[in-house]
Image: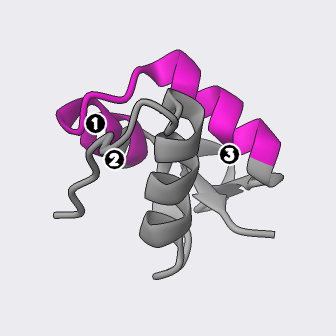
Amino acid sequence: VIAFEVTSDKTSAIEVACNFLQDLLANGPTDVNDIHSLAREQGISKSTTERAKKKLGIESERQGGKDGNWVWKLP
């Protein structure tokens, strides 16, 4: 489990979320439901996670055909 904490008042929630996503997705594509669950465990809201996704240019992709799961991956 990856743990992130805001260690400075200068560290914004979006920066924490960006670091979280970069570290998590460095291992390859990850199911979006797992991402949101792990982010919640770290105190990162879904909306902040989504903003970080956009800021980093993270790509969404459905794996396993039309009934498959959505994953996020680094560009």
Residue type for callout 1: Ser
Residue 28: image location, x then y, percent: 53, 78
Query: Which residue is rendered at x = 55% and y = 69% of the image?
Result: 29
Residue 49 in view (yes/no): no
Q: Answer whether labels 3 and 2 touch (C-beta < 8 Å).
A: no
Alpha carbon separation for disc pair 2 and 1: 5 Å
Considering every residue shown, the one lying at the far bottom of the view is: 27
The residue at which mark 3 appears reads as 66
Residue 66 shows in the view: yes
User: Mark 3, mark 2: which one is toward the viewer?
Assistant: 2
Q: CA distance from mark 3 to mark 2?
A: 19 Å
Which residue is pictured at 33% across the width and 39% down the height?
39
Assign the N terminus to one quadrant of the image. bottom left
- Pinpoint residue 47: horizontal percent, then vertical percent: 55, 17
- Name the residue that disc number 2 marks: 34
Q: Which residues are magenta?
A: 35-55
Looking at the image, do the residues carrying marks 3 and 1 touch, with CB atoms under 8 Å apart?
Answer: no
Q: Which residue is labeled 1 in the image? A: 37
Q: Secondary structure at mark 3?
A: helix
What kind of residue is marked 2?
Asp
Identity of the amino acid at label 3?
Lys
